Image (cartoon, helix red, strand yellow):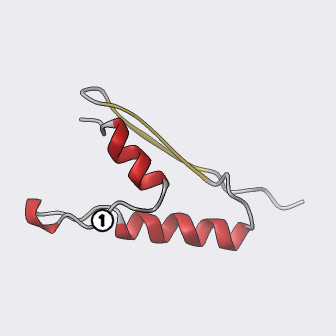
Amino acid sequence: KGIEEEKLKLIAEGKEKSNVSHGHTTGIGLNNVIHRLKVFFGREDVFSIYSSPGKGTKVVIRIPMKD
């Protein structure tokens, strides 16, 4: 269903918190994955998320190739 722009900003900044009251969690696990990818590959550009409310969400994870 897509994610609103303000919530996308919170996710990108690592500030999105868990939302257990609606039967699912968001943010904490995702933030952990993003952080681990950045540390492991030593890069900031390993994760992107694009979304349009009412249309959908696209998540891109970039795994650098070895030289």
Relative to the observer, which residue lies in front, 29 or 16?
16
- Horizontal side of 45 relative to 53 (left or right) equals right
The C terminus is located in which quarter? bottom right
Quarter-of-image position of residue 6: top left
**Which of 25 and 4 lies nearest the eye of the viewer?**
4
The disc labelled 1 sits on which kind of residue? Lys
As drawn, which residue projects farthest toward the right? 67
Q: Is residue 56 left or right of residue 62?
A: left
Q: Position of residue 51 (x, y in %)?
A: 39, 34
Q: Position of residue 43 (x, y in %)?
A: 73, 60
- The image quadrant of residue 54 is top left
The N terminus: image quadrant: top left
Element at label 1? loop
**In the image, what residue occupies the spot 38% across and 70% down?**
29
What is the crowding at mark 1: few (fewer than 14 residues within 10 Å), some, or many (at least 20)? some
Residue at point 67%, 72% (across, down) = 39
Instruction: Name the spot of residue 30 as percent of width and height, x first.
Output: 41, 63
Residue 42, compared with residue 64, is above or below; it is: below
Identify the residue at image location x=53%, y=63%: 34
Disc 1 target residue? 17
* Numbered circles on residues, count: 1
Give how far across and how far down residue 55 sits, in percent: 29, 26
Q: Is residue 31 above or below residue 10?
A: below
Locate residue 11 relative to residue 62 in the image: left or right. Answer: left
Name the residue located 18 percent from the left edge and 63 percent from the top edge.
24
Front residue of 17/38: it is: 17
